[in-house]
Amino acid sequence: MRILLVGCSGFVGRALVPQLLAAGHQLVLISRSSAPLAAVQSPQLQRLQADPAQAATWQLPAVQEALATSEAVINLAGEPIAEKRWSDAHRALLTSSRIHTTRALVAAMQALPEGQRPQTLISGSAIGYYGTSETGRFSETSPAGSDFLAGLCQAWEKEAEAASSFARVVILRIGIVLGADGGALGKMLPVFRTGFGGPIGNGQQWMSWITRHDLCRLIGEALSKTAYQGTYNAVAPAPCSMVNFAAALGQALGRPSLLPVPAPILQLLLGDGAKVVLEGQQVLPERLQQQGFVFEDAELSAALARATT
Ligand SMILES: NC(=O)c1ccc[n+]([C@@H]2O[C@H](COP(=O)([O-])OP(=O)(O)OC[C@H]3O[C@@H](n4cnc5c(N)ncnc54)[C@H](OP(=O)(O)O)[C@@H]3O)[C@@H](O)[C@H]2O)c1
């Protein structure tokens, strides 16, 4: 397949791109950077520099040509959620980097003549769609939450859904992605390796996770199997509490994991962004299980064994 990739130069893309190349796909990677994923060398990988959040990107002849010759599009673009304090300006960037990018991408797909449009769009969202709760259990049919992230995810999904009049749209509500070199685990690992790790906040918040390995496998399957359509919770079937996650991580590393990280420290560093780690939600992959997706990392201990090496 020839696939156009947006927002695939980051933590997930670093693993996804080599996997798609190994499967024999031809890739066009659109990035704001001039040499995204510089370590990945392949004649099957073409790089185009442009700012995907800018509407003008999608009118560049090279981008239009790439879009018109692609069978599928994968869109994971978005300013990182939990890296900075959420000032008004940062909230606007979190929003525009997802909403405007997806809107402009879908408009560019739609503007192509019918026979030239990519037939598949796989687009990101997050389990933040459901809001946070210590007691609720969320499947794909659960209602959206009412906080900032829930609103952002709803608006993000709406933009991608606009492509469903002409393409097969798969929206992935992604959970906490586990990989050693990024995301939440990438931040926790150095501390846990010293033996000074422990649960963050009160420890009762839910962690609904998926290994990066399984997320990339899922994207590969959703590309090739047309039975995938609509919205899926991209989480493993074994969500756990933060306190259990910290204990399992300590065990995987052979280190103590008893020192809690108090919430105020994180709030000082991240402001509202700390919410992503201090509050969680229990999310289940109901539709993936109905679809028969087989998780290779279904249990936390196996997931951490893979994700910490
Ligand atoms: N990692 C997780 O635990 C997790 C959980 C839930 C949802 N997600 C979502 O899944 C997607 C991929 O996650 P990830 O961890 O791989 O994210 P990431 O490493 O932060 O990469 C996201 C990509 O978005 C693009 N991007 C960043 N800031 C941007 C901006 N201001 N405007 C336009 N594009 C921008 C970057 O592409 P270029 O620099 O190449 O332009 C980057 O490759 C994201 O949308 C994220 O919100 C991730």
Image (tube, rainbow, N blue to C red):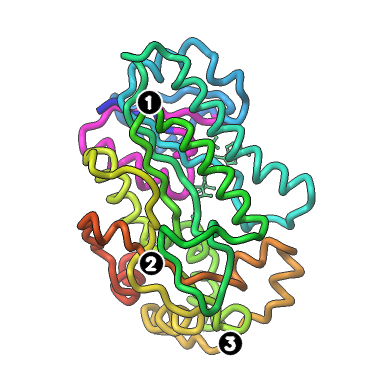
Q: Which residue is labeled 2 in the image?
A: 284
**Residue 208: within the magenta?**
no
Per the image, label 2 sits on a secondary structure element best described as loop
Inspect the image, locate mark 1, and give the three-letter code of the amino acid beneath it. Answer: Phe
Q: Nearer the viewer, residue 239 or 38?
A: 239
Q: Residue at x 48, y 32 (%)?
A: 162
Distance, label 2 to label 3, CA atoms, is: 29 Å
Whether residue 30 appears in magenta in the rendering, the answer is: yes
Q: Name the image quarter holding residue 283.
A: bottom left
In the rendered image, residue 16, in percent from the top left (x then y), is placed at 35, 44
Whether 159 is drawn above or below 204: the answer is above
Residue underneath mark 3: 259
- Quarter of the picture containing the N terminus is top left
Looking at the image, which is closer to me, 9 or 234?
234
Residues rendered magenta in the picture? 6-33
Asked if the residue at tag 1 contacts the one at tag 2, i.e. Cβ–Cβ closer than 8 Å, the answer is: no
Query: In this picture, is 147 found above or below 7?
Result: below
Q: CA separation, marks 2 and 1?
A: 29 Å
User: Where does the C terminus fall, quadrant-wise?
Assistant: bottom left
